[in-house]
């Protein structure tokens, strides 16, 4: 078993090493840096809202389980800070995720704890788009009644963990920079000898730090004349990569190639390809349109091995789609990218699917912030879709949930209209002639939601029919469209007396059924009936007094 695990780990690292020096990896690295910048901005905004006393409540949010990825099979947990601006979609929300070190997350790495845990912070509206709109996964909201002091404590914890992550990232960057420089030197010597190459830094603007930062090293073979600056080295980097790819084509007399900048395509010469010996793209375009009799054409520059241009190849788009490509050769730049290691804070630790996942991180967040908690996590504290039960047993979630399921309800409604099961509807392709049937049985509000859900997925001709049905109608607000409701304000606070508790009970009866209320209350009472009271449950006296006032637990939690 140990040998098998070692082989898998070696395979994992070998695959990552092959992908590390690709342009795609570099692009992913830059996008990841932008995510850190975005989270940093949201955390700053959240801290300012707390200072201005604009945060009025807390919620645990659970995303429904999904079969798309391994980490989604048990759902996902989010943590929401509710503010007082009456726009729930604008509320700042945290998702604790694996800080992956490449474009493709590794399931094995998620099992053995290779990744750190990273707080992705953004608005609830963006998470609704991610889960409800794009993945058809409803979100369940569970209110966590809390005091302002408890909210302040969460911000202190978040700030501490964020600073630890930033410090870790700086150390990782400096180490990666040094290692990449050494690896670039070794790679250059292997290919071109001791003195036959030069390396130079490839810098990109870093939005997180607001400066140019080195993300890669270019390796170029020395030419007859020395390079005067990095601009010349940069041009040589592409030219040499291009020439290596060109030489792999082995062109014959009856063959030519198309240059797609990142790839070369070898094809047979034929009458469908027009050669235009003119450097001016406007003149070449006019000549191609005149020749083919329409504007549905594509131009490719004609270049030789040294990238010297002599004109354009012109093809119709129809012919391009049916092109018989004899060989494709990727143009691979000779670079050594900085190896991106996963940053980890001491408090959040390493991500694992079955322990320190999003649910585990939420529990750590609460414990570190001195919130009441059970002694053990059990299965409920490890499975995100069951985390609300663990939190009820920890005296934190005393009420039933609200569900953000507008998109799911519409999809279910359309499936019923067309006579499909939920499973059959997954393969439905929306033929245009059936829009008339669908539109007849859904509301105007549903039509606006349909348009938002499918505008980027269905053909323009289909969406034009939907748009025609919306002309003259008033568009509902986004929150109403997706069923993002505001909860009664009093549910977010903590009661100190019977009058407050009486008002809470009245609100519960109006909002949920007796069965729903009883189901959650039983979880609280199971903890309340414990013979021995674990001291972790007594962390916040204000929470205990609230539940005593509601009649959910006895006053022995305070007196014992």
Image (cartoon, helix red, strand yellow):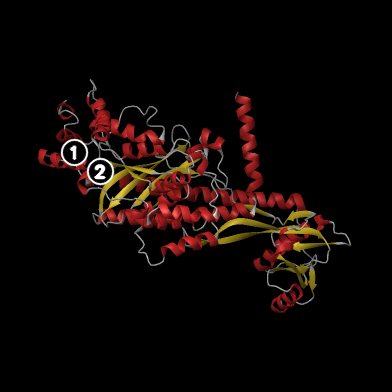
Query: Image point 62% across, 39% down: which residue?
Result: 13
* Mark 2 burial class by Cα count in 10 Å: few <14, some 14-19, many 20+: some
Residue tagged 2: 150
- Quarter-of-image position of residue 63: top left
Q: Give the quarter of the figure containing the C terminus.
A: top left
Residue 313 in view here: yes
Identify which residue, 295 or 245, lies in the foreground: 295
Foreground pick, 71 / 118:
71
Return the residue at label 1: 542
**Above/below status of 220 relative to 308:** above
Residue 187 located left or right of residue 338: right
Secondary element under disc 2, as helix, strand or loop, is helix
- Give SS at disc 1: helix
| Residue 231 image position (x, y, % from top left) | 66, 68
- Which x, y percent locates residue 407? 41, 49
Label 2 with label 1: CB-CB less than 8 Å: yes
């Amino acid at each position: 078993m140990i040998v098998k695990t070692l082989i898998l780990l070696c395979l994992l690292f070998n695959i990552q090493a092959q992908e590390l020096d690709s342009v795609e990896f570099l692009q992913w690295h830059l996008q990841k840096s932008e995510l850190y910048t975005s989270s940093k901005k949201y955390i700053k905004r959240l801290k300012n809202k707390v200072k201005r006393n604009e945060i009025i409540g807390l919620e645990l949010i659970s995303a429904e389980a999904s079969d798309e990825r391994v980490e989604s099979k048990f759902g996902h947990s989010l943590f929401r800070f509710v503010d007082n601006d009456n726009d729930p979609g604008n509320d700042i929300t945290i998702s604790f995720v694996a800080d992956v070190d490449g474009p493709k997350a590794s399931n094995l790495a998620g099992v053995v704890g290779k990744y750190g845990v990273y707080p992705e912070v953004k608005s609830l509206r963006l998470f609704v788009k991610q889960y409800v709109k794009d993945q058809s996964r409803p979100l369940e909201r569970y209110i966590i009644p809390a005091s302002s002091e408890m909210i302040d404590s969460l911000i202190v914890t978040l700030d501490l963990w964020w600073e630890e992550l930033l410090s870790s990232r700086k150390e990782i960057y400096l180490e990666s920079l040094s290692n990449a420089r050494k690896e670039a030197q070794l790679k250059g010597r292997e290919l071109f000898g001791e003195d036959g190459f030069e390396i130079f830094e490839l810098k990109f603007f870093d939005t997180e730090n607001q400066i140019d930062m080195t993300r890669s090293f270019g390796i170029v073979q020395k030419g007859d004349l020395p390079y005067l600056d990095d601009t010349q080295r940069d041009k040589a980097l592409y030219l040499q990569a291009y020439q290596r790819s060109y030489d792999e084509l082995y062109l014959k007399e009856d063959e030519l190639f198309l240059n797609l900048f990142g790839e070369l395509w070898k094809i047979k010469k034929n009458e469908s390809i027009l050669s235009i010996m003119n450097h001016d793209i406007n003149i070449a375009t006019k000549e191609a349109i005149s020749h083919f009799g329409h504007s549905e054409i594509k131009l490719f520059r004609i270049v030789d091995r040294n990238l010297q241009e002599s004109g354009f190849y012109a093809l119709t788009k129809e012919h391009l789609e049916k092109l018989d490509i004899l060989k494709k050769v990727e143009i691979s730049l000779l670079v050594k990218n900085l190896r991106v290691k996963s940053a980890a804070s001491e408090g959040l630790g390493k991500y694992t699917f079955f322990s320190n996942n999003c649910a585990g991180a939420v529990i750590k967040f609460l414990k570190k912030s001195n919130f009441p908690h059970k002694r053990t996590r059990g299965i409920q504290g490890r499975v995100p879709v069951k985390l609300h039960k663990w939190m009820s047993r920890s005296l934190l979630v005393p009420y039933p949930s609200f569900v953000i399921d507008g998109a799911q309800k519409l999809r279910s409604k359309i499936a019923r209209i067309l006579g499909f099961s939920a499973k059959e509807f997954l393969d439905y392709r929306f033929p245009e002639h059936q829009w008339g049937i669908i539109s007849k049985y859904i509301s105007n509000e549903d039509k606006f939601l349909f348009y938002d859900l499918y505008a980027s997925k269905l053909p323009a001709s289909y969406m034009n029919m939907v748009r025609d049905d919306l002309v003259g109608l008033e568009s509902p607000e986004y929150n109403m469209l997706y069923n993002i409701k505001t909860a009664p304000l009093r549910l977010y606070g903590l009661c100190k007396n019977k009058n407050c508790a009486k008002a809470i009970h009245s609100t519960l009866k109006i909002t949920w059924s007796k069965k729903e209320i009883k189901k959650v209350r039983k979880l609280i009472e199971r903890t309340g009936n414990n013979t021995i009271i674990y001291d972790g449950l007594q962390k916040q006296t204000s929470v205990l007094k609230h539940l005593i006032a509601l009649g959910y637990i006895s006053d022995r939690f305070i007196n014992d």
